[in-house]
Image: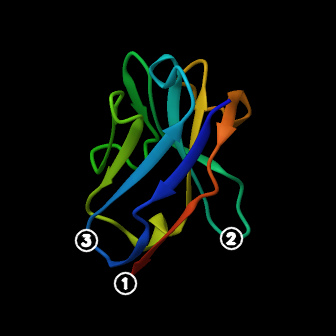
């Protein structure tokens, strides 16, 4: 069993930066692939980034967002730079067996943290 708690969301102006954190509890954190997803009102949850043996990103965030992890701290991060109003969403972290963009393949999910980017 893994519990995930996101933090670091907030209100930021366009062009600004935020760093999201996702703290995990439970065993074997390092064995899980981790992903970040986001969901804006009225839309489906969409893939943002994943990290396993390597990293992958949605095209919409490539070059602006960076996913990383610290296994000793059981934490995964999402550094978000050059933020745009269209990045506004609730951001979720997830743990699974493989670093996939498919949300249904993740086993554990956090409760989410709101990111709002003003224009």
Real-space Cα separation, disc 2 to disc 1, in angstroms: 18 Å
Residue 119 tag number: 1
Q: Quadrant of the N terminus?
A: top right
Q: Is residue 67 left or right of residue 82?
A: right
- Residue 62: x percent and y percent? 34, 43
Residue depicted at x 62% and y 49%: 110
Q: Is residue 16 above or below residue 61?
A: below
Q: Which residue is mark 2?
A: 41
- Residue 2: x percent and y percent? 62, 33
Answer with mark 2 or mark 3, whichever residue precedes in sequence: 3
**Front-most of residues 4 and 50:** 4
Q: Which residue is mark 3?
A: 15
Real-space Cα separation, disc 1 to disc 3, in angstroms: 9 Å
Q: Secondary structure at mark 2?
A: loop
Answer with mark 1 or mark 3, whichever residue precedes in sequence: 3
Q: Residues within 10 Å of mark 1 (few under 14, many from 20)?
A: few
Q: Secondary structure at mark 1?
A: loop
**Front-most of residues 69 and 84:** 69
Q: How many marks?
A: 3
Q: Is residue 100 left or right of residue 44?
A: left
Residue 45 tag number: none
Residue depicted at x 49% and y 25%: 29
Q: Quadrant of residue 108?
A: top right
Residue depicted at x 35% and y 36%: 73
Q: Quadrant of the C terminus?
A: bottom left
Q: Is residue 105 above or below residue 7?
A: above
């Amino acid at each position: 069993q893994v519990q995930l708690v996101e933090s670091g969301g907030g209100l930021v102006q366009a062009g600004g930066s935020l760093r999201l954190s996702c703290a995990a509890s439970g065993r074997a954190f390092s064995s899980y692939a981790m992903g970040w997803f986001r969901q804006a009102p009225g839309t489906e949850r969409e893939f943002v980034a994943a990290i396993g043996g390597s990293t992958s990103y949605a095209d919409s965030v490539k070059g602006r967002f960076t996913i990383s992890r610290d296994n000793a701290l059981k934490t995964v991060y999402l550094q978000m730079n050059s933020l745009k109003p269209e990045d506004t969403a609730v951001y979720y972290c997830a743990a699974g067996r493989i670093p996939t963009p498919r949300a249904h393949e993740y086993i554990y999910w956090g409760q989410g943290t709101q990111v709002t980017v003003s224009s």
